[in-house]
Amino acid sequence: MSTTTQSRENSRTNFDAIEQAFHSVWKTLYAHVSSDNRQAEELKVQLSQTLVSLVSDGITDPKELRRKALENMALSLG
């Protein structure tokens, strides 16, 4: 397998993990968000940034991403 092909597969795997974790975490966060759309959008951006940071740290398992993201979000919101 070429380096380019492997890189694409890793990118796709990482994207899938981020997407899966995002939806899972968002379901939890959404229950605690006010009806203010602006707050929801800000939380989505913060969650996205948190997930990308976790993946860049080498965490690619969706369940671990979810756990760490919830932990990080709770700390930043609390």
Image (cartoon, helix red, strand yellow):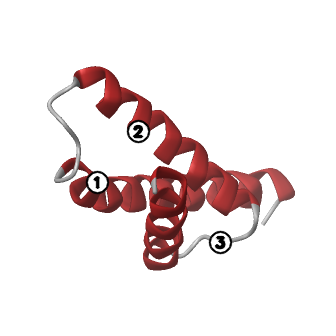
Q: Earlier in the sequence, mark 3 or mark 1?
A: 1
Using the image as rendered, state which of residue 38 and residue 59 is in the foreground.
38
Residue at mark 3: 59
- N-terminal of the pair, mark 2 or mark 1, is 1
Mark 1 crowdedness (10 Å alpha carbons): few <14, some 14-19, many ≥20: some
Q: Which residue is mark 1?
A: 29
* Residue most extreme to the front: 78
Q: Position of residue 49 (x, y in %)?
A: 59, 43
Q: Amino acid at mark 3?
A: Ile
- Image point 51% across, 78% down: which residue? 64
Identity, as a three-letter code, of the amino acid under mark 2: Leu
Q: Residue at x 43, y 69 (%)?
A: 66
Residue 32 at x, y percent in the picture: 21, 51
The earlier-in-sequence mark between 3 and 2 is: 2
C-alpha separation, residue under disc 2 versus residue under disc 1: 8 Å
User: Is the C-beta separation of discs 2 and 1 under 8 Å?
Assistant: yes
Q: Nearer the viewer, mark 3 or mark 1?
A: 1
- Residue at 75% across, 55% down: 7
How busy is the neighbourhood of tag 3: few (under 14 within 10 Å), some, or many (20 plus)? Answer: some
What residue type is disc 1 on?
Leu
